[in-house]
Amino acid sequence: MSLIGVVYLSGNINGRMSEYMVPVIDMLERNRKVAGVLIRVNSPGGEATASEILYRKIKKLREKKPVYVSVSSMCASGAYWAASVASKIFAMETSLVGSIGVISISPSFKRLLDKLGIDVTVNKIGKYKDMNNPFVEPSEAGNEKMTQIMNSVFVSFRDAVARERKLDEKMINELATGEVFSSADALKFGLIDSVGTYEDALEALKKETGVRKVKVMMPKKPFISRVIGFALRDTIAEIMDSAQF
């Protein structure tokens, strides 16, 4: 019997999340019983590489079967990069969508170290090897190089959204400012397809696929996490058994 697979994309996007998500997306792509996929998104974004990996995996999945996205609170930055490739995007009235941009935050402790009278010696081979080193004063050349790197990532992000959402150059340049949009504005600008709930998205996908059965697909945790989880569960059970009420 065919079914609709539901998967959750929640929290900060990083390497660990992509490692959890990729096997699930691959399984959804290969499984012939899965007629369509609904991804529930609530994420502020995260690492560029992990976001691009998810984008490419979801794109490959969408080429074989419909993929809908339902946004709860937020679908921003890298999360929107990944979601932009979906067949259709639904968002709640109170959702925040977009943040098409790139940011890099590098703290500097140089002035604090100077006040404390602490010197830091950096030995390096390579002009930019200490770029973003928090213990030295940022150099103009290093800042320029970082800007170039960030701009390359930004272009990939911006162009992917423009391509997937069919936005012309003028529109994507107006939207790619790093700001988030309300669902009403996101709909008006073409960043989403409908303002609606998870149930609305699910019903639309059921209608498209003609399938009613729904199954939530959860990433399989690493072995060590499962072992720790079992041990913690048993410990809690022992404490509860010995407790006096």
Image: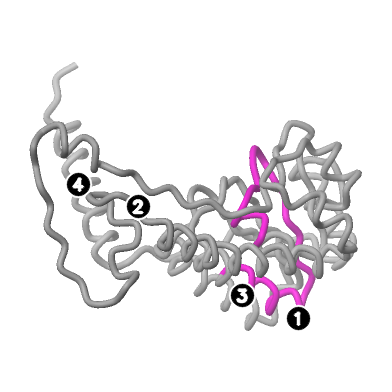
Disc 2 crowd, CA 10 A, few/some/many (<14, 14-19, 20+): some
Residue at 10% over, 47% down? 119
Q: Which residues are magenta?
A: 54-81
Q: Given the image, on which type of amino acid does mark 2 rest?
A: Pro
Q: Which mark is residue 176?
A: none
Q: N-terminal of the two: label 1 or label 4?
A: 1
Q: Is residue 65 magenta?
A: yes
- 36 to the left or right of 107: right
Q: Is residue 19 magenta?
A: no
Residue of label 2: 138
From this viewpoint, is residue 1 visible? Answer: no
Q: N-terminal of the two: label 3 or label 1?
A: 3
Quadrant where the C terminus sits is top left
For residue 12, above or below residue 168: above
Residue of label 4: 234
Instruction: Give the percent coordinates (x, y) of residue 207.
Output: 89, 60
Which of discs 1 and 4 lies nearer the camera? The answer is 1
Camera-side residue: 8 or 75? Answer: 75
Q: N-terminal of the two: label 2 or label 3?
A: 3
Residue of label 1: 64
Quadrant where the N terminus sits is bottom right
Instruction: Give the percent coordinates (x, y) of residue 88.
Output: 82, 59
Which of discs 4 and 2 lies nearer the camera? The answer is 2
Q: Given the image, on which type of amino acid does mark 3 rest?
A: Lys
Q: CA distance from mark 2 to mark 1?
A: 47 Å
Q: Quadrant of residue 57?
A: bottom right
